[in-house]
């Protein structure tokens, strides 16, 4: 893109964009593309640190980190082998030894980000994997997987597979302080020409009276989603369960409630009835992968984001955005600009859209098409709290106590004391610090007044000459980002 055009894009985007106080600002970090293969422990940590630092500058407040691409693990597990996407050989531990999931939890939390552990529930072998470890589920129980298009898929019809996957998730939740558990769009396999899903035998033996094999497959996946939801709620009820489905639920030609599109369908081709899960409250957030551009002939972005907004069903809706495709295509209404401004405008117009997840993190970090610059200087320039989930918990913690400025050897500091709280619903886990000038209206919905969102019980004050009066307010957040009443103090800086 020419310099003049880039400048135009920046000027258009930097026109006053309304800032919102609550928004999910996520990015996917995947391993299945092999980006970490061949890296030493030190190199992978430095690569991830750099990505997290840049994403933090861009305004990200959540990372979705792939930890189980093919019934393996990017963490030490007694249930599944180490991933070859980490070490190059399935079952081989990293050397020098480390725990990528634990490390990512710590690094994300240090930066004020949530960490959502991303698993692929059914995929047991990708096309590029040639050797499985001896303790891999497909080796120990070959009868529980089927082969399809060079992959192994855990058969969704089998109860023991549902139990097994839920046990893997429960193990992750018990051992790691993750904020979310995330699955993407791999349920029954994507259709491949000349391939047939080999489950006719199970259907004939355990149809449960369902007289259509498509309905039966959807029934199997529905059972799993409900069981996984219940597992998470039982083990750690504050962990958010999110699903990122393929961007088209159904086409209108297949169903009156479908979108005006003509692509592959979640319901008909992947046997994933996402709307059922949303409307039954089995998932806590939904991230449809609307990776296409505005004006796509068969899967138009505008058509799809409006369809998902209409069908959000009382659960937070975040939009999966393809960074590279967004900057590749011009805005049909403004050929001098790529599509980020137009897409962000749609986000702001649609009431049920509560956030964005970037596909993929490295593309934003690499700042293709100035995407990262536009996030940090405009769209995500102010801090954001996570969207509320009152269906999990809607009670705010008590407000902080003893908010007081104190001179220390490190400078002028604002200290406060954590409020008392009993149980995960009442305990404060983070704090929001606001600053208002003497002529400012006290407005806690204005994110430009947020100085920091922190797990600490202190922050450094920008002391100058002690002549300017400010009001500092501190609120407490619980695990579900419910916000307490403010505790205030007057400060001269």
Image (cartoon, rainbow, N blue to C red):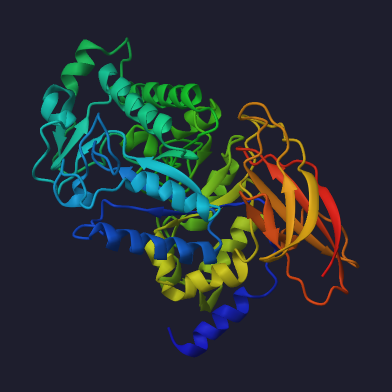
* Visible residue check, residue 331: no
* Visible residue check, residue 1: yes
- As drawn, 133 above or below 201: below
Q: Viewer-proximal residue, 193 or 450?
A: 450
x and y, in percent, of residue 15 in the image = 67, 75
Point out the residue furthest to the front here: 409
Query: Left or right: 86 with respect to 488?
Result: left
| Residue at image point 39% right, 66% down | 363
x and y, in percent, of residue 352 in the image = 63, 45
| Residue at image point 38% right, 42% down | 118
- As drawn, 7 above or below 285: below
Q: Viewer-proximal residue, 282 or 24?
A: 24
> Quadrant of the rendered structure where residue 69 is?
top left
Instruction: Report the number of discs.
Output: 0
For the C terminus, the image quarter is: bottom right
Q: Viewer-proximal residue, 367 or 309?
A: 367
| Residue at image point 76% right, 43% down | 400
- As drawn, 257 above or below 39: above
> Quadrant of the rendered structure where residue 29 is?
bottom left
x and y, in percent, of residue 92 in the image = 16, 44
Query: Left or right: 446 with respect to 71?
Result: right
């Amino acid at each position: 893109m020419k310099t003049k055009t880039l400048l135009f894009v920046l000027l258009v985007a930097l026109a006053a964009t309304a800032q919102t106080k609550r928004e999910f600002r996520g990015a996917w970090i995947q391993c299945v593309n092999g980006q970490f293969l061949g890296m030493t422990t030190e190199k992978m940590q430095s690569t991830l640190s750099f990505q997290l630092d840049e994403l933090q500058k861009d305004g990200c407040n959540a990372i979705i980190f792939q930890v189980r691409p093919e019934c393996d693990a990017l963490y030490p597990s007694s249930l599944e082998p180490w991933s070859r996407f980490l070490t190059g050989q399935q079952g081989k531990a990293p050397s020098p030894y480390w725990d990528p999931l634990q490390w990512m939890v710590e690094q994300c939390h240090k930066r004020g980000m949530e960490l959502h552990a991303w698993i692929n529930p059914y995929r047991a072998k990708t096309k590029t994997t040639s050797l499985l470890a001896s303790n891999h589920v497909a080796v120990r129980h070959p009868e529980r997987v089927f082969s399809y298009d060079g992959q192994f898929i855990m058969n969704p019809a089998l109860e023991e597979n549902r139990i097994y996957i839920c046990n893997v998730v429960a193990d992750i939740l018990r051992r790691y302080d993750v904020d979310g558990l995330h699955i993407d769009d791999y349920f029954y396999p994507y259709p491949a020409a000349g391939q047939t899903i080999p489950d006719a035998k199970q259907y004939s033996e355990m149809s449960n009276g369902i007289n259509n094999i498509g309905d039966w497959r959807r029934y199997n996946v529905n059972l799993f989603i409900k069981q996984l939801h219940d597992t998470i709620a039982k083990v750690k009820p504050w962990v958010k369960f999110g699903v990122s489905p393929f961007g088209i639920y159904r086409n209108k030609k297949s169903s009156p409630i479908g979108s005006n599109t003509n692509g592959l369908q979640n319901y008909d081709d992947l046997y994933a009835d996402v709307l059922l899960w949303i409307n039954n409250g089995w998932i806590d957030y939904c991230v449809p992968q609307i990776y296409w551009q505005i004006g796509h002939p068969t899967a138009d972005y505008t058509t799809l984001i409006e369809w998902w907004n209409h069908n959000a069903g009382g659960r937070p809706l975040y939009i999966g955005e393809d960074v590279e495709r967004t900057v590749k295509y011009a805005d049909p209404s403004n050929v001098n600009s790529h599509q980020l401004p137009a897409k962000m405008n749609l986000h702001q117009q649609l009431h049920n859209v509560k956030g964005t997840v970037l596909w993929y993190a490295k593309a934003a970090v690499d700042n293709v098409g100035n995407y990262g610059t536009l996030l940090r200087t405009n769209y995500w320039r102010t801090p954001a709290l996570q969207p509320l989930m009152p269906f999990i918990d809607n009670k705010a913690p008590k407000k902080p106590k003893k908010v007081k400025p104190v001179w220390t050897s490190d400078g002028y500091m604002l200290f406060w004391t954590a409020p008392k709280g009993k149980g995960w619903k009442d305990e404060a886990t983070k704090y929001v610090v606001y600053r208002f000038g003497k002529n400012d209206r006290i407005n806690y919905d204005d994110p430009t007044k947020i100085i920091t969102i922190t797990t600490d019980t202190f922050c450094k004050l920008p002391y100058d000459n002690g002549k300017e009066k400010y009001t500092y307010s501190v609120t407490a957040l619980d695990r579900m980002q419910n916000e307490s009443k403010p505790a205030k103090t007057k400060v001269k800086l």
